[in-house]
Image: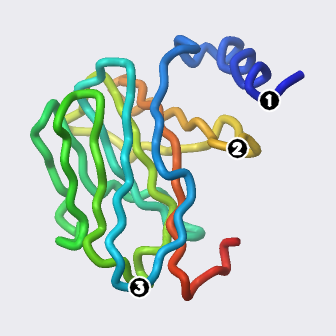
Amino acid sequence: MRPRLLLCVALYLLGAGHVGAMVVQNPRYLVTGLGKPVTLSCSQNMKHYAMYWYQQKPSQAPKLLLYYYDKQITKEKNTSENFQSSRPNTSFCSLDIRSAGLGDSAVYLCASSRDTELKPSLPSVHKPLFPRAKSPLYTCLPSGNHERKWFKAVIISSVDRSWI
């Protein structure tokens, strides 16, 4: 069975929603030099008002950097000013790293959901549904049952290639 067909069948069997629902993040992988600017883009076709950017470092849980509700951005208090973002419309947002540093080597995750929860009761736990897929889909169900769908991109500095 072809990987894409298998993924669609598995999503249907797991009840993960419409097969046509997508979050697309570009680029999938990126190697850059120290001090270089980086732009990651994310688009979704589900008319979700909320979009999120997470950073995941090796052996750590994903950390929320910022999120949008409609076009209003909220940055987490520990998010560096080196991270900027824009959302010109509800289906697209970008994450910009002004000057990539060694500490920015990480997996960056984009997520979307219909709504955002103002007071989550517990931190969300994000686990891959298909860890071997080329561009894995992640699903998160926060305590308010607002489903988020996300894809990942990896940024590796040209100095640290231990993830390759």
Colour setup of the view: rainbow
Which callout, 3 or 1, points to the residue nearer the camera?
3
Q: Residue at x 53, y 14 (%)?
A: 20
Circle 1 crowding by C-alpha within 10 Å: few under 14, some 14–19, many from 20? few
- Residue 3 image label: 1
Q: Secondary structure at mark 2?
A: loop
Q: What is the x, y in percent for residue 135?
A: 63, 42
Look at label 3 and name its amino acid: Leu
Question: In the rendered picture of this protein, how many numbered marks are placed on residues?
Answer: 3
Along the horizontal axis of the image, is 40 left or right of 67? right
Which callout, 3 or 2, points to the residue nearer the camera?
3
Q: Quadrant of the C terminus?
A: bottom right
Circle 3 crowding by C-alpha within 10 Å: few under 14, some 14–19, many from 20? some
Q: Secondary structure at mark 3?
A: loop
Q: Which residue is mark 2?
A: 134
Look at label 2 and name its amino acid: Lys
Along the horizontal axis of the image, is 10 left or right of 103? right
Dividing the picture into quadrants, the one containing residue 1 is: top right
Q: Secondary structure at mark 1?
A: helix
Q: Residue at x 50, y 66 (%)?
A: 155
Q: Which residue is mark 3?
A: 34
